[in-house]
Amino acid sequence: TSSDSSGDDSSVSTGSALAAGGGASFSFAGLPVSTITIESEADISRALIIAERVRSLPGSITPPEPETYQYLAITPYRLEDADFDEATISFHVPVGYLSAMGKETTDVALMRYVDGQWVRLKTTLIKEEGGRAYYEAVTPGFSVFAIVLEKDGATVAAPVSTPAPVATVGEEE
């Protein structure tokens, strides 16, 4: 992955190919978004994604209802919506910020601005580590996003475990 940071407010990433299936993973530095993973049957090896912090929304965009932690603009180049079904955006929020706002780690969601309205994306709390809560959200495309504080906005990822053997008690023959 070649990734360079031009200032604190934007990060440019070229994709690194995913081993299985197809697609690419894009890594970012200095932003709440850490990676964007796109599974695709199309050749997206030349794709480039720029993610940048948006300090204030353009006048044409009304802020979403929930309180917003951060706005982000995610812009793909050499990548069309037709090249993929969905992308997974990995992002994080400081746990101290959530506590100061009186919120739990499950009170976070990612919203996407599309067709003149904010759409809440399926958001999953992955883990808490090093003072940050890590999330994943699935999006069908890219535009302006808002990380919002919304009661029970995120579901908790199910821990990966091996199923316990089922014990049968008092089985009759």
Image: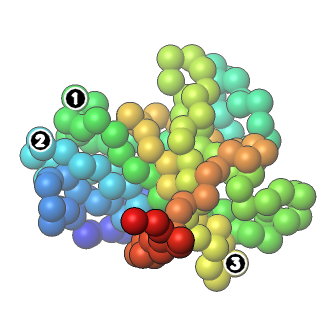
Number of other residues with Cα within 10 Å of mark 2, as a class: few under 14, some 14 to 19, many 20 or more: few
The circle on residue 82 is 1
Tell me which amino acid carries mark 2: Ala
Q: Secondary structure at mark 2?
A: loop
Give residue 150's quadrant in the image: top right
Q: Which residue is mark 2?
A: 42
Q: Secondary structure at mark 3?
A: loop
- Which quarter of the rendering shows the N terminus? bottom left
Give residue 146's quadrant in the image: top right
Do residues under tags 2 and 1 come within 8 Å of each other at their CB atoms?
A: yes
Nearest to the observer: residue 54 or residue 34: 34
Do residues under tags 3 and 2 come within 8 Å of each other at their CB atoms?
A: no
Point out residue 79 in the picture as x, y percentages from the top left corner: 23, 39
Mark 3–mark 2 Cα distance, whole angstroms, equals 38 Å
Nearest to the observer: residue 155 or residue 76: 155
The circle on residue 44 is none
Tell me which amino acid carries mark 3: Gly
Q: Which residue is mark 3?
A: 131
- Which quarter of the rendering shows the C terminus? bottom left
Point out residue 147 in the picture as x, y percentages from the top left corner: 64, 47
State the residue lying farthest toward the left: 43
Tell me which amino acid carries mark 1: Ala
Q: Secondary structure at mark 1?
A: helix
Give residue 112's quadrant in the image: top right
Q: Residue at x 85, y 65 (%)?
A: 99
> Can residue 9 be seen by looking at this rendering?
no
- Mark 2 vs 1, N-terminal side: 2
- Mark 3 vs 1, N-terminal side: 1
Point out residue 100 in the picture as x, y percentages from the top left corner: 88, 64
